Amino acid sequence: MNQNKNGTKDNKKYILMSICSVLVFLFIWELVTDVLGIFKSTMLPSPVKVFGTFIDKFTNTKPDGATIQVHTLASLKVALSGYLIGVGIGVPLGIAMAWFRKVDCFVTPLFDLLRPVPGIAWLPVLIVFFGIGLLSKAMVIFLSAFIACVINSYSGIKNTRMVHLWVGQTFGATRSQLLFKVAIPTALPMIFTGLKVALGASWNALIAAELLASTKGLGFMINQARGIYRPDIILVGMIAVGITGAILGYLIELLQKLVMKRGWRQ
C-alpha cells in the first residue's frame, strides 16, 4: 500500500512538473514576443498567434490547399505504411541474424554497408524509380525503420544470458523452445526500444521526404509556409509533428505494457 501511495505521489509530482515546465516555456515565449518585442512577429510569432493559426487550420485550406487534419492523415498514411513493413521485416531478420550463425554471416556484410546510409539519402534514387508518390516516401521510411529494428532485435537476442539457456537445455528444451520461450521474451525490452527508435527515425525521414518531394502532408505544409514566409504555419506544422509523434510513441508504450502483462517478461 505504501509503495502504491508513493508511486501515485511520484506520478502526480511528475505530471505537475511537466505542466509547470510547459507553462514556463509558454510564458517566456510570450514575454520575448508580444510583451517585450525582442522578436518581431515576422520572425517568431507569439504563442497566442500560433494557437490561433492552429485552430484556424482545422477549417482553412489556405495557403497549402488542405486543412491540418488532412495533412496529418496524409503523413500518417505514408509513415505507418513504411514503418509497419520495416518492423515486420526488421524484427524477424534481427532475431534470425542473432540466433542463426549462417544467417548472420550471410546478411551482416550487406547490412553493414547499408546501415551508415540514412534513409533520406535514398530518396533521389527512389524518386527516379517510383516518382514522388506514396511508394517512394514509404520506402524511405521503411529503410529508416528497418535498420533500427534489426540492430535492437539483434542486440536483444545476443544479450540473452547464457545461464538462462543452460537451464532450459537442462530441462530438455529444444532450440526453437529456447528461442521463443527464453531468448525472445528476454529481448523484448530491447525490441520495443527498437520500435520506438524506428518510429522516431521514420517520422523524421517522412518530414524530410515531404519537404523535398510531396504534394500533401505536414512536411509539405511546412515547406509551403516557408516559401511564403509564414512562420506561424511553420510552427503549427512543427507542433502537429510533435503531437502526432508523441501519441504514436505513447501507443507503443501501451503495447509494450500489454505484452509484458501477458507473461512475456522473464
Image: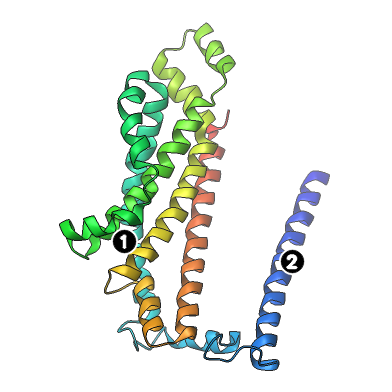
x 38%, y 42%: residue: 115
Which numbered dot is residue 16? 2
Q: Earlier in the sequence, mark 1 or mark 2?
A: 2
Q: What residue is pinned by disc 1?
A: 78
Name the residue type under label 1.
Val
Q: What x and y, as percent, mark residue 158?
A: 49, 25
Pick the quarter of the image with the C terminus: top right
Q: What x and y, as percent, mark residue 113?
A: 34, 38
Please state which of the two labelled residues, at mark 1 or mark 2, is closer to the viewer: 1
Of 11 and 140, the residue lying toward us: 140
Q: What x and y, as percent, mark residue 154?
A: 45, 31
x 80%, y 44%: residue: 3
Question: In this picture, is 241 found above or below 158?
Answer: below
The answer to whether one can see residue 150 in this image is: yes
Q: The residue tagged with tag 2: helix, strand or loop?
A: helix
How many marks are shown on the rendered structure? Answer: 2
